[in-house]
Image (cartoon, helix red, strand yellow):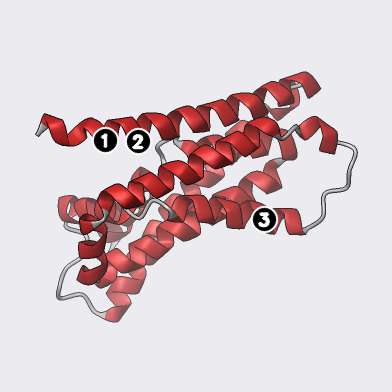
């Protein structure tokens, strides 16, 4: 059971650890709005990964086949969503909001927007399947209880990673002034747009290298 638990933690961390668009967004919100907004963003990303982990564990082959058959369209939609959100982040000035009271619903918006952006990349299910095979994590002989524990351990690993990331970033938050917050916001927006364009170009030319 300990080995099973450790494997789940490792898979959860591997899936969540790459500092991609959502990682940048989580960092930007933690720095500009505070730790709670960083957690809300992280929760949205974790819920999306949880959704795909459940599909992978349950072995929903028709979903996997659909993703494989429509990879380019799904990638294009994901890149477009990240680019548009990057543009919004670049244009949006957090300084204008510093004197306004942030309503509770902002946390919900942060969570939902993060979930929406992460869910546009269903190819993560293929990453789960590859990791399951590598670590021999999920077996056909598993019972429902085994499958639930498999997903739970992955969720714990992902949550631990996001908690660590948000707390590290929050630790340095006090070192940024108002101008720094604006620079971070614009830098995050540019990074999101560059990442989306770079990913699209890479996926567009990838078939020519096979």
Callout count: 3
Q: Is residue 5 left or right of residue 139?
A: right
Query: Where is residue 87, by image quadrant?
Result: top right
| Residue under the image location 52 percent in, 55 percent down | 116
Above or below, comparing residue 26 to residue 159 in the picture:
above
Where does residue 178 sit, x and y in percent of width and height? 80, 23
Question: 166 above or below 69?
Answer: above
- Secondary element under disc 1, as helix, strand or loop, is helix
**Of 3 and 100, the residue lying toward us:** 100
Image-based side of 170 in relation to 174, left or right: left
Q: Residue at x 75, y 59 (%)?
A: 105
Residue 43 at x, y percent in the picture: 56, 55
Q: Quadrant of the C terminus?
A: top left
Check disc 2 and report its element: helix, strand or loop.
helix
Local crowd size for mark 1, using a 10 Å CA cut-off: few (<14), some (14–19), many (≥20): few
Mark 1 touches mark 2? (CB < 8 Å): yes
Q: Check if mark 3's residue and mark 1's residue have beta carbons within 8 Å.
A: no
Location of the N terminus (image quadrant): bottom left
The answer to whether residue 114 shows anywhere in this view is: yes
Extreme residue in the left direction: 210
How packed is label 2: few (under 14 Cα within 10 Å), some, or many (20 or more)?
some
**Disc on the earlier residue, 3 or 1:** 3
Do we see residue 10 in this rendering?
no
The span from disc 1 to disc 2 (Cα, nearest Å) is 6 Å
Residue at the image point whose x is 44% and y is 36% from the top: 20
Which residue is nearer to you in this view: 31 or 156? 31
List x then y, in percent, for residue 25. 57, 38
49 or 160, which is in the foreground? 49
The residue identified by callout 3 is 109
């Amino acid at each position: 059971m300990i080995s099973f638990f450790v494997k789940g933690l490792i898979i959860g961390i591997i899936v969540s650890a790459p500092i991609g668009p959502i990682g940048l967004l989580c960092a930007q919100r933690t720095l500009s709005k505070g730790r709670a907004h960083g957690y809300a963003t992280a929760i949205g990303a974790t819920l999306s990964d949880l959704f795909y982990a459940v599909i992978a564990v349950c072995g929903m082959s028709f979903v996997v086949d659909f993703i494989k058959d429509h990879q380019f369209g799904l990638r294009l939609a994901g890149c477009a969503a990240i680019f548009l959100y990057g543009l919004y982040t670049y244009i949006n000035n957090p300084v204008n909001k510093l004197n306004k009271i942030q309503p509770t619903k902002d946390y919900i918006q942060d969570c939902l927007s993060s979930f929406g952006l992460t869910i546009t990349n269903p190819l993560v299910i293929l990453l789960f399947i590859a990791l399951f095979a590598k670590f021999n994590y999920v077996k056909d002989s598993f019972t429902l209880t085994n499958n639930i524990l498999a997903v739970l351990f992955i969720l714990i690993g992902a949550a631990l990673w996001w908690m660590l990331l948000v707390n590290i970033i929050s630790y340095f938050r006090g070192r940024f002034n108002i101008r720094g917050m604006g620079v971070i916001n614009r830098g995050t927006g540019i990074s999101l747009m560059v990442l989306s364009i770079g990913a699209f170009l890479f996926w567009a030319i990838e078939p020519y290298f096979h």
